[in-house]
Image (cartoon, rainbow, N blue to C red):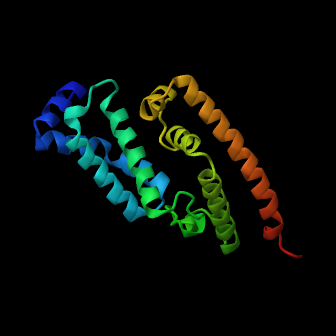
Amino acid sequence: MEDHELLIRLRRKDERAFLLLVDLHQDRVFNLCFSYLRDIEEAKDTAQEVFVEVMRSAESFRGQSTISTWIYRIAVNKSLDRLRYLGRDKRSAEEQPHTENLHDHASNPQQVMEEEERRAMLHRAIDSLPENQKTALILFNFEGLSYQEIAGVMDTSVSSVESLIFRSKKNLKEVLTLRFAEWLPLTKTKK
């Protein structure tokens, strides 16, 4: 079904169209929310709020972007709002649950602990980025959106997105270099 037809049906409060829309976008919306919130239940709740908002505001969607870009913009805004509400803009990575079983990738507990620490370090570094850089980085690296799509989600120009991603990677590299230098001596064992 084309975006235009789907939008017409959404505006008529067509339940089938809404279910199709949810089916098409729920995984990516959840993943995007989880990228910000790093809590499964909060991400589920926020993703649900995203789709409620989509249905509620279908009448006001002007079609200046694709439906998916519009949905991602709502998801980013809802996720950021949720972080502010929870008071966790710079949430500590130690509190964040991991999404994969690290034991599958490591042969011993030492490797598991080191991988968990590296992952926590990466989350802390990403959380330390300015909000707009963090958003651009998440949409590009974790969600796989193009610069054009990110520009639509963030309501900015493609050149601004390029700059945000460049600066986010530069800042992330600086933060990780410092943190890795601090962390490395802690992981060495005495022989």
**Count the marks: how many?**
0
In the rendered image, residue 46, in percent from the top left (x then y), is placed at: 35, 55
* Residue positioned 26% across, 42% down in the render: 54
In the rendered image, residue 119, in percent from the top left (x then y), is placed at: 62, 59
Q: Quadrant of the N terminus?
A: top left
In this picture, is 34 found above or below 1? below
Name the side, left or right, on which 115 lies relative to 97.
right
State whether residue 107 appears in this view: no
Residue extending farthest to the bottom is 191
Q: Which residue is more in the foreground, 68 or 156?
A: 156
Q: Quadrant of the C terminus?
A: bottom right
* Residue positioned 67% across, 65% down in the render: 117
State whether residue 81 appears in this view: yes
Name the side, left or right, on which 185 lies relative to 1.
right
Name the side, left or right, on which 154 lies relative to 56.
right
Q: Quadrant of residue 48?
A: bottom left
In this picture, is 83 found above or below 173? below
Q: Quadrant of residue 180?
A: bottom right
In the rendered image, residue 6, in percent from the top left (x then y), is placed at: 19, 31
Residue extending farthest to the right is 191
In this picture, is 147 found above or below 116? above
In the rendered image, residue 2, in percent from the top left (x then y), is placed at: 22, 26
